[in-house]
Image (cartoon, rainbow, N blue to C red):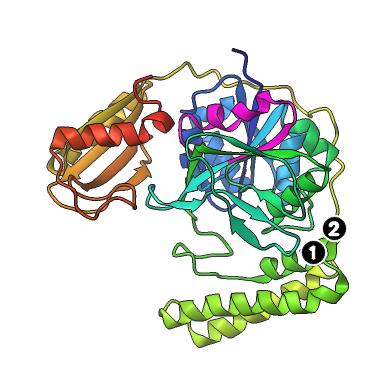
Amino acid sequence: MTHPAVSVVVVSRDRPTALRRCLAGLFQVQYAPFEIVVVADPKGAAEIADTPMGDAIKLVPFDRPNISEARNLGISHAAGDIVAFIDDDAVPEPSWLTQLVAPASRPYVAAMGGFVRGRNGISYQWKARSVDQFGDTELMEMNPKRATVLKPRGARATKTEGTNMAVRRDVLIELDGFDPGFAFYLDETDLNLRLARAGHATAIVPMAQVHHGFAASARRRPDRVPRDLFDIGASWAVFQRKYLAESLRREHWRNIRMSERTRVLEHMVGGRLLPRDVTSLLGRLDQGYSQGLMRKRGGAQLASSPISPFKPMAEPPRRSVLLAGRIWSARRLRAEASRRVKNGEIVTLLLMSHTALYHHVRFHPDGYWEQRGGIYGRSDRDDPVFRPYGFAERVEREATRMGAERLLGQ
């Protein structure tokens, strides 16, 4: 079966270490043909240049803090039929692209979005949602094992997340890409609403999964506490001008501001912010809103032909293997996992203790997936707090749970 050519666009700014980890995960994605387009600041560009992976990547220098402009630049260099997007602080499962773009076999499907797991590698940050012209989202129930194609109905659009989505390149050109008025925040929401207004169908693909870490940035700390709300305020002003009648904007902004105030006050009560920080953050939110009322908005008018030819990844197919052992064997097993990654395998390392500790999953800097927890503890958070397992039984259970995404047994 011939797959459509896919360009994966990664935008990176001020996070070179996270970018390296993201790229290590992308190099394990089992799909052909695809290329990687990295739009990066000087730190990210230097990180790529210092690694063997640099020659396999389309590197596009860009040093302005505007994610929509950066994504549009990535689209301009993308030569695939489909353009996929992932954040630099995310790592895809090896089956990611195969799952994500499968609905594109139906010509009326223009966009696709997958599920996003959070920091513990188990729970979901985002599943399936819809969004309306107020920016309000609602959860949607989906078959967790099968893609669902959703055609536009009424005022709501299907929501996709910028860290796990794909769109046909010709549709992105038709819609003028991302609106540079959204330098940060609401950029993909705006695209979702424009896709719906143009009558395009979107597929939600639960099995297309990435792990998203919420790495620190100029706008938030590692613990997700905000450092600056300027761009959030500016984006809401641009959003209102595009989608809301003027008579609705004042009340809408009052509600948005109250929501942001509640959020920062919760951080203050939790000891993560000082009272003066709350005043400063809300002041920056208001400044951003005022600036957004004057900010230019509209599409980017992208060229229909890509700037550079398709640069397919030359990685051979990899075998996916599972290593499992007791926590006291961690040092030896981690060394083996690293060695097998260097030998071209996709490795999942399962380390368990005789406890009921919850399980956590991370993509190790050495390029393997590590899952830690108790033999009797939860992996899926809907499981019982304690369930009696034997070691071999628990290993088999976890291999079944993650097997399709991790390509175990294939």
List x then y, in percent, for residue 402.
Answer: 36, 35
Residue at 82 percent of width and 36 percent of height: 173
List x then y, in percent, for residue 212.
Answer: 48, 49
What's the residue type where badge 1 is placed? Val
Asked if the residue at tag 1 contacts the one at tag 2, i.e. Cβ–Cβ closer than 8 Å, the answer is yes
List x then y, in percent, for residue 283.
Answer: 67, 81
Q: In which quarter of the image is residue 105?
A: top right
Stretch in magenta: 92-113
Of residue 110 and residue 91, the one placed in the foreground of this image is 110
| 329 is higher (above) or lower (below) than 355 | above
**Image quarter in which the N terminus is found:** top right
Q: List the residue tagged with mark 1.
A: 238
List x then y, in percent, for residue 277.
Answer: 54, 81
Q: In which quarter of the image is residue 203?
A: top right
Of residue 302 and residue 402, the one placed in the foreground of this image is 402
Return the mark for residue 297: 2
| 314 is higher (above) or lower (below) than 6 | above
